[in-house]
Image: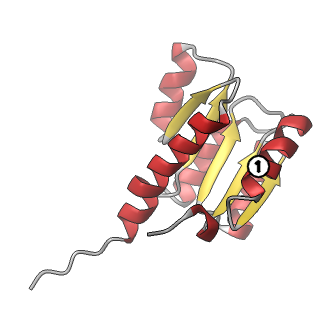
Amino acid sequence: MKKFKELTLLLVEDEDGIRESMQEVFGGVFQKVISASNGDEGLKKFKKFSPDIVIADIMMPIMDGLEMSRQIKEFSKNTPVVILSAYSEKEKLLKAIDVGIDKYVIKPIDMDELFVVLEQIVKTKIIGADIIEISG
């Protein structure tokens, strides 16, 4: 079973303080944490490093989290993407569904809740994708 220590995380957050504190927490849990401060930078780092999981803020300069996620899903549809947002409005939620976001977490972030979400994603999206059924 894959654990966080075997996985690479891409964290895309435009607020320096939030990004740095989350990177510190995730750094002790994941094999590698790559960070970016906007969607354009996040997309470039995604293509360069091929992370296992992406966590991104929805509202960022240059390219927002949903547009970045849409492009990631075109490039790698099975990579799980978690969107963090201070907004719970219907329009943003529906767009996130259309993009294929795996989870939508409302800010302020409860790190315990976020880890539960990540555990579910690892079990269903990453481990589930690694299971190969052999029939006789």
* Pointer 1 local density, CA inside 10 Å: few below 14, some 14–19, many at least 20: few
The answer to whether 33 appears left or right of 125 in the picture is right
Whether residue 95 sits left or right of residue 83 in the image: it is: left
- For the C terminus, which image quadrant? bottom left
Residue 76: x %, y % from top left:
53, 60
Front residue (pair 78, 25):
25
Where residue 119 appears, x then y in whole percent?
Answer: 50, 50
Front residue of 25 and 53: 25
Name which residue lies at 63% across and 51% down.
54
Q: Quadrant of residue 9?
A: bottom right
Q: Confirm whether residue 36 shows in the render.
A: yes
Amino acid type, label 1: Val
* In the image, residue 79 above or below residue 131: above
Counting from the top left corner in percent of width and height, residue 10 is at 70, 55
Q: Quadrant of the N terminus?
A: bottom left
Regarding mark 1 in the picture, which secondary structure is present there?
helix
111, above or below 50, in the image: above
Q: Which residue is mark 1?
A: 25
Q: Residue at x 69, y 60 (%)?
A: 46
User: Looking at the image, which is closer to me, 12 or 6?
Assistant: 6
Q: Residue furthest top?
A: 89
**127 sits left or right of 83 in the view:** left
Q: Residue at x 64, y 18 (%)?
A: 87
For the residue pair 124 and 73, the one nearer the viewer reads as 124
